[in-house]
Image (cartoon, grey):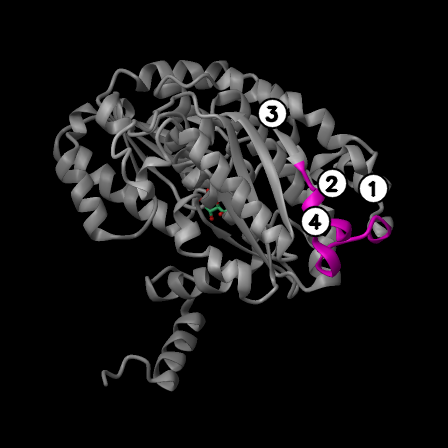
Amino acid sequence: MIRFDFSNLMQDVVGRNGLSEDDFKTIDTARLIEIIDSRKYPELEFLDLPWADISAIKEVGRYARGFDNFLLLGIGGSALGPRSILEALSPFHNLRRSPKVFIYDNVDPVTLSNILEIVDLKKTVINVITKSGSTTETIGSFMIIWQRLKEQSLKPEDHIIVTTDPEKGNMRKIADDYGLRSLPIPNGIGGRYSVLSPVGLLLGETIGINSNEMLRGASDIHGRCMDPDLWRNPAFLFSSGLYLLQSLRNKNITVMMPYADRFKSFAEWFCQLWAESLGKDEKGFTPYPSVGTTDQHSQLQLWMEGPRDKVVIFLSIENYGKEINIPAVFQDMEGLGYLSGHTLSELTKIEQEASEIALTKNGRPNITIEVPTIDEYHLGQLFHFFGIATAVAGFLYGINPFNQPGVEEGKNLTYAMMGKKGFEAKRKEFEQYRQRSGRFELM
Ligand code: PA5
């Protein structure tokens, strides 16, 4: 099991920047349990994912495995989860294994052109992931790919797999009308909470990752995250510790710092979850992704001596699964020789602890989550743990952690300028602002 060390959040360790046990008395765990048990939000359905039947995902995965390339079209929660699975569990994937995976999750003509130059569509399966079925970025790239398939006389039903709402939306309609393979994202589950649904698991199954192990990991940590005793519940401690540090000690930034390149995308997945879920009603905690040891030489100075507004979350890896010894060369040079006889995992682990101790000594609160090893089982635990902890943080802030009303205005303005019906008034508004701000005048 992943293990948690919250001691460096506490006053007796980090001094006045930390919390006392009394501070936690305001946390009403019975209310949190009640919100969860009563399923106050239908989106809490993500809690059931560890026990879902994944036989249909496996079957579609077997089909997708027959192609040379797997091209994923999606954005936000429809891309960050799959990418973190790919990078954590199959590093350097495209240089080693097949199908090669391409995740196109932006609007960038250069990236898509490059992908289309590299992949042969005849040998490519395309997974379009969109819960709503109306996300401009995803729909736009889907339309381009659809046309390219047609131009090459390829049958969309052979090449496209749709992951979308079971009943509603444009992509559900297209999947049904054209007889495309499709996988449903369960009703209540929204993008950033969907990694353990077909959204993440189909890619996993396609590249030979054991989804059952991921779900077993999630189910094994579930009970601990539902414990009504705050001091035994890591999800409640994580969310309430951070919530209290913000409301009582003015910490506003959460740094996610795994000590593993394989977790870089995981850190980005966490940042989306934390930001989009909590940033509402002028509340929220700004997350940013980082990686150890690299960012010790980039960000650590700021965390040590800059504003006292951050909480660093270390993900430390107990067993990297591979080892490299630092050889006994340059023994006569003191500046190098001291490293001989040590290993790379020893060095990175010591550096993680050293950063933790340095921050702690300087009164900078931090949390360490120890991951026994990077595999399906523990990744499943991390996904489920952070899903629960984020939802619970939302309940503590008194906001709905499952919606994202703040992104609607930008979407509507985009619809307007791209000519979507019903948005004519927004178009006027867009043009007025454009003129008023003068930002398009070259200097
Ligand atoms: O977390 C979310 O709900 C969002 O980030 C979505 O994942 C993102 O906007 C893409 O939405 P959709 O899957 O509907 O295309």
Specify the quadrant of the image occupied by residue 363. bottom right
Residue 372 in the image, given as x and y percentages of width and height: 55, 24
Q: Secondary structure at mark 4?
A: helix
Instruction: Say which quadrant the N terminus sits in.
Output: top right
Can residue 19 be found in the magenta stretch?
yes
Mark 2 belongs to which amino acid?
Answer: Phe
Disc 3 or 4, which lies upstream in sequence?
A: 4
Task: Confirm or reject: label 2 Cβ below 8 Å from ligand 1.
Answer: no
Image: magenta residue range: 5-23
Disc 2 or 4, which lies upstream in sequence?
A: 4
Mark 1 belongs to which amino acid?
Answer: Thr
Alpha-carbon distance for marks 2 and 4? 14 Å
Residue 397 shows up from this direction? no
> Mark 3 = which residue?
218
Q: Tell me, for residue 9, which label it has, or none.
A: 4
Alpha-carbon distance for marks 3 and 4? 25 Å
Mark 4 belongs to which amino acid?
Answer: Leu
Residue 382 in the image, given as x and y percentages of width and height: 57, 32
Q: Tell me, for residue 29, which label it has, or none.
A: 1
Instruction: Say which quadrant the C terminus sits in.
Output: bottom left
Image point (83%, 34%), residue name: 229
Q: Secondary structure at mark 2?
A: helix
Question: Is residue 346 rendered to the left or right of residue 215?
Answer: left
